[in-house]
Amino acid sequence: MVQTELQQIIMNIHRDNIQKIVVAAVVLINNAPLLLKRTTNDFMGGLVELPSGTVEKNETILNALYREIKEETGLQILSVEKILGTFDYVSQSGKKTRQINFKVLTNNTPIQLSAEHCAFYTYKIDNPIFSTLNISPETQKIILQALN
């Protein structure tokens, strides 16, 4: 099912002249999403986001997903549960970017952040602290979809 959905997403990416593809994952830890805070000196500094990253040239979307989650968190994806949807934005380089969001299961090793993130959070969405985090509305929507 994921492959069929991915084929449609790829066709839409070509149709919409998307210049850059980013993959992101909702990783649930005790039913709370794993969120990463971007360092303040990076593009969109201070933004709290899902583990994510760019699909490199000649790399499949799923290979990029596995690689990026490992690079950003140290976690290994055990399975891809479903596609949660996409959203678009303009990257730091000015490219029209589409983010493909997945719900995944990972191993439970300790989180090891990459240099582009300065903190991680695992607050449940009903925790008052969750609403104080600098999370984009698009990412909040994806998190809610993952929990339903």
Image: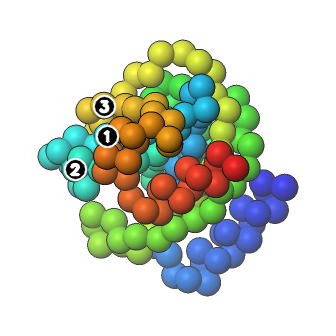
Local packing at callout 2 (Cα closer than 10 Å; few below 14, some 14-19, many 20+) is few
Tell whether 32 sits left or right of 19. right
Few, some or many residues within 10 Å of mark 1 (<14, 14–19, 20+): many
- For label 2, the SS is loop
Q: Which residue is at a point 54% across and 34% down the rendered structure image? A: 32
In this view, 117 is above or below 20:
above
Which badge, 1 or 2, is on the more N-terminal residue? 1
Taking the spot 31% from the left edge, 46% from the top edge, the residue there is 132
**Could you tell me which residue is drawn at 37 percent across and 52 percent down?**
135
Q: Nearer the viewer, residue 138 or 131?
A: 131
User: In the visual, does 21 lie left or right of 66?
Assistant: left
Q: Position of residue 129 (x, y in %)?
A: 36, 38
Secondary structure, mark 1, is strand
What distance separates the C-alpha of mark 3 from that of mark 1?
Answer: 5 Å
Quickly name the residue at label 3: 119
- Which amino acid type is marked by label 2? Gly
Few, some or many C-alpha atoms within 10 Å of disc 3 (few <14, some 14-19, many ≥20)?
Answer: some
Would you say 16 lies left or right of 50 here? right
Instruction: Measure how far apart labels 1 and 2 are at the Cα level.
Output: 8 Å
Q: Are marks 2 and 3 in contact (CB under 8 Å)?
A: no
Q: Which residue is mark 2?
A: 45
Q: Earlier in the sequence, mark 2 or mark 3?
A: 2
Q: Which residue is mark 1?
A: 37
Residue found farthest to the right: 1
Label 3 or label 1, whichever comes before in sequence order:
1
Figure quadrant of the N terminus:
bottom right
Do the numbered discs 3 and 1 sit on residues whose CB atoms are within 8 Å?
Answer: yes
